[in-house]
Image (cartoon, rainbow, N blue to C red):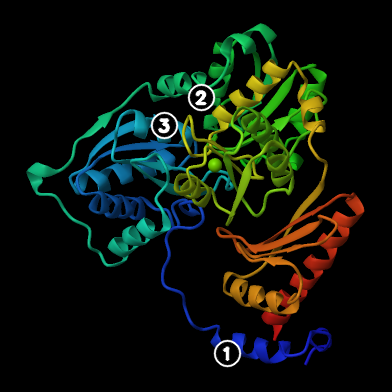
Amino acid sequence: MSQALKMLPKGAEERFARIRNGRTTRNRRRLFGTNGIRGLANVKLTPEFAMKIGGAIGTFLEEGHMLVGYDGRISSPMLAKAVIAGLTSTGCTVYNVGMTPTPAIQYAVRYHKMDGAVMVTASHNPPEYNGIKVIADDGIELSRQREIEVEDIFSDDRIRKAKWNAVGEARQLPRILDVYRDGIKKHIDVTAIQKKRFHVIVDSGNAVGGLVAPYLLREIGCKVTTMNANIDGTFPGRTPEPRPESLGELSSIVSVADADLGVAYDGDADRSIFVDERGEVYWGDRTFGLIERSFLQDNPGEKIVTPVSSSILIKDVADEYGGDVVWTKVGSIIVAHTMKKVKAKLGGEENGGVFYAPHQPVRDGAMTTALILDIMAKTGKKLSKLLAELPRYHIKKDKITCPNELKKPILEELTQQIRGMSVDTTDGVKIGFPDKSSILIRPSGTEPIYRFYAEGKTRKRTTQLLTEYKAKADQLVDELTNN
Ligand code: MG
């Protein structure tokens, strides 16, 4: 027995032994993760794979009319063509919309009354990855239950082949981005924004966000300065995941240029992270809290949907302005489907996803930007001032590496160790403390890691929580890997 194991609580050793003995059991094959299918381009996501998944989707949808679009990654046009081949082989009619942000194709599905869409994108993942998001006729990604049906068709090779004269047509559908921008403008006070002549720095991260935001913002009277605007699948400007630590350049440019706002999008522009006029970068749940406050002022009594990874700030705002928070598991698809189920008009995530259902109940980076500008124009306040009006919490996030097969045993062990504390097990474990601080420990749905979200009224308390629980989880990974 190792020295570290001796320090573990009573019963832990026996539980570890059970876990180690049972570790050889393999889970059934899952293609879809938290947010679609992801993998290394031309390794897991080969043209053959893309064509087969296109066939499985086409079989599931039974000769529907489908849109296919793709992001700016190097492998995306190749994979999109393979998906189109798979879909048309089952008899589906496919409209290729070309390069597009994910929210624009989601909007187009409903606008053009399609049966669904396939978006080839790995969103915020590194450049060597790619992925496939499957969208239903309501513009929302497939629910888990329907994903399983597609997975089963794929795994059992039950792909339908249309007769030679019933193979689907592949057509082009241009101008979906024009329709999408017009759709966003319906939900904001364009005249009020035009009067302010805001200067906005747009960092699209060499990704597809650059196809929409700069044009939309100019149309609503903003002065726009772009950075990382050329689409480049190697993402030379910054990582495709917009996080405070990866947006240093945007922050500097906003303050040097004396701009009113900075905004950065992820790889498929469904998420947006904002920078105030002083160059301070905010996590998404803080700017979501601002949108929530403005929304509840106009719509008191509405439900707000957000994952357990969001700040308690969302509940504070709801309590003050008469809203009702519905907490969910982490994952944009879960938030969107919960919103539909509970008839909520607003949802949001800490990573910069905001779901504004009057436009569409999915996260949408350009819509979120327009809502922030709308609030700034209507209140006449700078973003720093608006955000300072919200309750203040210190938030720290971190992660540790953890093999996928150990995720579940570690969660079980952690739950045992914190028995008796105030725990929310909606997703991973979230421990709440009487001083309103909390720590969420949850296994990632897409990567072999455990994520930590610590929150407290002081920086010291937040750091203390993060250090304590990260060490606890690290020790468990260590024990289960080495014994
Ligand atoms: Mg994304």
Q: Quadrant of residue 207?
A: top right
Residue 53: percent from left, percent from top: 33, 54
User: Residue shown at 31%/29% (left/top)?
Assistant: 112
Residue denoted by label 2: 211
Q: Which quarter shows the N terminus?
A: bottom right
Tag 1–tag 2 contact (CB < 8 Å): no
Q: Closer to the observer: label 3 or label 1?
A: 3
Please give the residue where the numbered disc 3 appears in the rendered image.
107
Between residues 245 and 62, which one lies in front from this camera angle? 62
Mark 3 to mark 1: distance in Å? Answer: 49 Å
Image side of residue 217 versus residue 276, left or right: left
Please rate how many residues cluster around mark 3, counting C-alpha atoms within 10 Å: few if below 14, some from 14 to 19, many from 20. many
- Mark 3 or mark 2, whichever is nearer to me: 3
Q: Amino acid at mark 2?
A: Leu
Which residue sits at x=59%, y=74%? 408
Q: Which of the two labelled residues, at mark 3 and mark 2, occupies the earlier sequence position?
A: 3
Is disc 1 placed on a helix, strand or loop?
helix
Q: Secondary structure at mark 3?
A: helix
Query: Which residue lies at the image location 78% right of the left edge and 58% below the top edge?
Result: 438
Pick out the residue farthest to the right.
460
Disc nearer the start of the sequence (1/2): 1
Q: Is mark 3 within 8 Å of ligand 1?
A: no
In the rendered image, which residue does mark 1 sit on?
21
Q: 382 above or below 234? A: above
Cβ atoms under marks 3 and 2 closer than 8 Å: no
In the rendered view, tell whether residue 342 sits above or below residue 472: above
Please give the name of the residue rendered at 51% of the width and 84% of the height, measured from the top-left corner.
Answer: 24
